Image (cartoon, grey):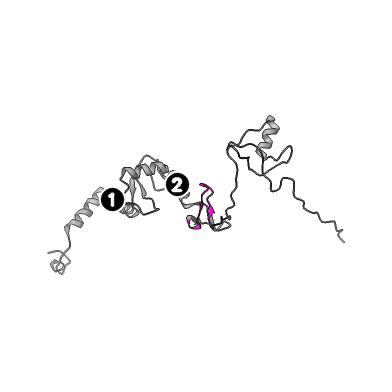
Amino acid sequence: MKKLVPLRIHRPSQTEGKICAGPSKVEGNECGRPAYQSTPMLLCIAHASQLRQKNEMVPLPEPWLKLNRAARDDKGNKQCTRCKRWLPESAFGSSKSAPDELKGHCRQCEADRLLLNKYGLTVEQYEALLAMQGGVCAICQKPPLEGVRLCVDHDHGCCDETYTCGQCVRGLLHADCNAALGYFNDSVDFLRAAIEYLTRGTIDLRDIDTQGEIA
């Protein structure tokens, strides 16, 4: 018969659930990273390594504050992990892998990041470009819908659809205007032909003979 041994009782370590008290570059804030050791004080791995190697600690770039993505304020708002604003749940996209099935960053931050990564435009540059266009679409001259940015149109002969070099942006367009250029393959000849077609007017079906030709 196998000999039974006493069960080992788990006892929490002295650092469990505690944070590092090391310096931070942000005035008035401690490091905030999870504590790794408790002596001579509560320190994270980075600060403990600094103290061990150089006998001094230097501030780390910023306080490390891991947000609880499922947390809500008294109004039911969720905090964005990037801009740190408390926003309604409708401001976040869905994510099945998240505890609350919502992305950690808000739609606005996601759009700002896409603007920079795909087109090389900062939010400030986008706003300046929109102001240069008079605050309207460069083609239909209509303003953007509230809360919706105009599409960034670029020269497809320079860059593909995935990412651009940031030097071939042509302007800002409504989604329909931008799609129309795409359907015409950015061809000036096709667009001229479309204008001629529209200005030609309608056809009187009585002028079409039985062979399907216009009389």
Percent from the top left, x then y, of residue 34?
A: 66, 44
Tag 1, which secondary structure?
loop
Residue to which mark 1 is pinned: 141
Q: Which residues are magenta?
A: 77-90
* In the image: residue 5, left or right of residue 125: right
Q: Secondary structure at mark 2?
A: helix
Compared with residue 140, is residue 37 higher up or lower down, i.e. above or below?
A: above
Q: How many marks?
A: 2
Q: Specify the label residue 112 is tagged with.
A: 2
- Whether residue 91 is visible, yes or no, is yes
Q: Pick whichever, 75 or 25, lies toward us.
A: 75
Which x, y percent locates residue 104?
54, 52
Residue 132 in the figure: left or right of residue 196: right
Q: Give the x, y percent position of residue 106.
A: 49, 52
Residue at horizontal 72 percent and vertical 38 percent from the top: 41
Q: Residue at x 69, y 46 (%)?
A: 18
Amino acid identity at mark 1: Gln
**Furthest residue toward front:** 74
User: As drawn, is 57 to the left or to the right of 95?
Assistant: right
Q: Give the number of the disc on residue 6.
A: none
**Quadrant of the image containing the C terminus:** bottom left
The residues tagged by marks 1 and 2 sit, at their Cα atoms, a distance apart of 24 Å
* Neighbourhood count class around disc 1 (C-alpha, 10 Å): few under 14, some 14–19, many 20 upward: few
Magenta-drawn stretch contains 123:
no
Is 83 in front, or is 172? 83
Q: Amino acid at mark 2?
A: Asp
Quadrant position of residue 163: top left
Quadrant including the N terminus: bottom right
Report x, y in % for residue 67.
58, 49
In the image, is residue 80 part of the stretch drawn in magenta? Answer: yes
Is residue 158 something that shows in the picture? no
